[in-house]
Amino acid sequence: MTTPLHHLIDLLDLERIEENIFRGDSQASVVPRVFGGQVAAQALVAAGRTVPDDRDAHSLHAYFLRAGDPGAPIVYTVDRIRDGRSFTTRRVVAVQHGQPIFHLSASFQAFEEGLEHQEGMPDAPDPETLPTAAECLPRHAHLFSHPGVAERLLEARAAVDLRYVEEPPYATAAQGPREPRSQVWFRANGKLDGPIDEPLLHVCLATYVSDMTLLDSVLLAHGRGGWAVGDVVGASLDHAMWFHRPFRADEWLLYDQESPSSTNGRGLAQGRIWTADGKLAVSVIQEGVVRVPRG
């Protein structure tokens, strides 16, 4: 396991301070707020640690309420809403400085046999043929709004090997609008292991990554490069995920993303995460603030 991945797992390994209360720290961020994928993954860890061992996460629905302070701990309180024969429901509130910054509802299910179908996986090149972030970001550092952004992005994403199928929005904004669709391959940058039980660890790692690139497709539709180049101000508003089938987040996963709509300062994006052998593992939907800076 690489050191950045080890640090990320330590970050997700929350401290239990009471029966249904947990505390977590934050990592350094490229923007002056807690990364949304981090707080979502930590909240799911908190929920999962109050659930019977025979039940796995199958969905989450979350709202980002306030910008988190990366310099302060986050307290997660878990409400045990329901423990049924097949399903378990938990509600988690993340609190900083006495105020809620994030709200999560998560559902867990005991395995059962049922009807099975899925649509086909979209075409995508072999991830091993694509440039790494360490190869891609420095090439475009001159496009960023401030010096050091490329280095901070590399540091923030070092725990994950994330590879764009096509050039990311920050590299192509000057070319004008493109089809509102983006694809990335990703996997943990090392073998996943540690104090968080499987498969919860893999689900939480995918939750963490799911917030990194999902609004890219909104930017592409308008020829915008995003916050890194300074032509858009954005933040996640709400986030929903459905975990369909087991997967490993330390093996290649294809994140296929598109945007059906943007309006009123908000952009909607939806994504599907596929295993390398073509199984639909996760569906994701997010709406975010996407504003053009004034002046």
Image (spheres, rainbow, N blue to C red):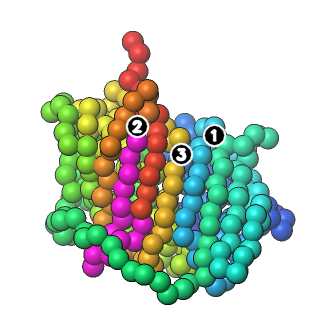
Mark 1 and mark 3 in contact? Answer it, CB < 8 Å.
Answer: no
129 and 267: which one is in front? Answer: 267
Q: What is the secondary structure assignment of the residue under circle 1?
A: loop
Q: Residue at x 48, y 76 (%)?
A: 192
- The residue where tag 3 is placed is 238
Quarter occupied by residue 15:
bottom right
Quarter occupied by residue 195:
bottom right
Query: Residue 205 — which label?
Result: none
Q: Is residue 59 visible?
A: yes
Q: Earlier in the sequence, mark 1 or mark 3?
A: 1
Q: What is the secondary structure assignment of the residue under circle 3?
A: strand
Quarter occupied by residue 98:
top right
Q: Earlier in the sequence, mark 2 or mark 3?
A: 3
Where does the image place residue 163, in percent across and percent down from the top left? 28, 59
What is the three-letter code of the residue carrying label 3? Answer: Asp
Quarter of the picture holding the N terminus: bottom left
Q: Nearer the viewer, mark 2 or mark 1?
A: 2
Q: Is residue 62 above or below residue 291?
A: below
Q: How many angstroms separate mark 2 from mark 1 (CA)?
A: 17 Å
- The residue where tag 1 is placed is 65
Where does the image place residue 177, in percent across and percent down from the top left? 20, 34
37 and 240: which one is in front? Answer: 240
- The residue where tag 2 is placed is 267
Q: Is residue 152 magenta?
A: no
Q: Residue at x 65, y 79 (%)?
A: 86
Q: Residue at x 36, y 56 (%)?
A: 271
Q: How many angstroms separate mark 2 from mark 3 (CA)?
A: 11 Å
Q: What is the secondary structure assignment of the residue under circle 2?
A: strand
Mark 2 and mark 3 in contact? Answer it, CB < 8 Å.
Answer: no
